[in-house]
Amino acid sequence: MERRFVILTGKAQAEIQSEEFDLNQPLKDNEAIIETTTSMISAGTELSRVYAIKQGFSYPVYPGYTCVGKVLRKGAGLSHIEVGDRVFHSGPHASINKYSHVGTTQGAKILKVDERLSDNQACMIQMGLIAMNAVTACTGNLNDTVAVFGLGTIGIVAALMLQKQGMRVICFDPVESRCEEGRHAGLNECYSTAPEKQVEVLKELTHGKGAEITVDVSGISPAIVNAILGCAKYGQVILLGSPRASFSCDITPVLNAIHMKMLDVKGAFNQLDAFGETDGTRSNVMRNFETVQRLLLDGTIDADKLISHTIKPEEIMSAYHGLMHEKELWHCAVIDWTK
């Protein structure tokens, strides 16, 4: 059987290659062969490699970690899925994947999706699981204001989740179309404010105090600075985005703000939660997975409002270019592997 896949061969060089794939090859207990119908591009992670923003890696790269497809074969150890199941799994962009389910943290996973979800909705599960890291880290309550910096897909989803908890959520992104998308998705307050004005506007909106909780979803270092400077006394700063590009600044005012305002700065990296129920914590991937599916089914997260483009595999470089350089038009893209 032919397997098609995306490969990054160099900076700004993405292409589709193919190879022969043996469907009858031996499988370990924790392995499965999955035929992909849809995969979603992760704009932050993938663009950092397409355009060599991330440091310390080398080409070739096989990008992608969000796929939906059908289980063709599986190992005996994967008792939670069956042959024929439609599953969400964190495999690379490819028409067919042989995938190993590690099952200890939320890095590698294969999970059966609710049949009521469309493929596009099922792809959005990964964005929801990442966003949930901000929700589970957040110590806010109904009295608090949350400021979210960055309205990419994960930023919008995280803001929707925080807003559903009853807190006031104020969102910032310098790209107006992203703010429009956020409003269309259901967010109450979105401001297309230039980065250098965001702290000032946030304080105007909060009577000079700042927000009790600030969340950076962009992974852009100046936005993290804004999240710290815009946080109120005794507040919490959550770093959901992954900083990648080099950035130089006078760090003393940032450290002084953390010190003088007694801020709690917390990392919310995506791959540290336990996969299943574990003594000592309520947070785990399976619980988050069920929550995200529920929010997709009840319309809190509307995948159709968040996905701007559906492409053929051969259009992958056009999608990367659009997501990187045409942010007013491109917000979230999925690949249809059935075309």
Image (cartoon, grey):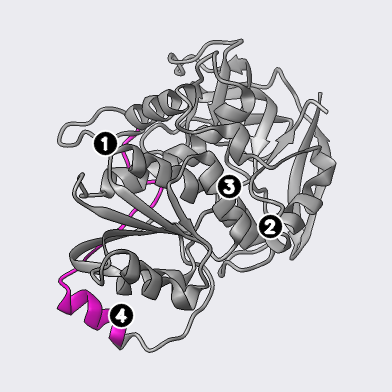
| Res 328 label | 2
Rendered view: 252 above or below 294: below
Q: CA distance from mark 1 to mark 2?
A: 36 Å
Amino acid found under the numbered disc labelled 2: Glu
Disc 3 vs disc 1: Cβ atoms closer than 8 Å? Answer: no
- Residue 165 lies within the magenta run: no
For mark 3, give the secondary structure: helix
* Residue wearing tag 4: 254
> Which residue is drawn at the image coordinates 53% and 11% (left, top)?
82
The label nearer to you, 3 versus 1, is 3
For mark 1, give the secondary structure: loop
Rendered view: 274 above or below 44: above
The label nearer to you, 4 versus 3, is 3
Which of disc 3 and disc 2 is earlier in sequence?
3
Range drawn in magenta: 253-275
Disc 2 vs disc 4: Cβ atoms closer than 8 Å? Answer: no
Amino acid found under the numbered disc labelled 1: Ser
Q: CA distance from mark 2 to mark 3?
A: 10 Å
Q: Is residue 164 left or right of residue 193?
A: left
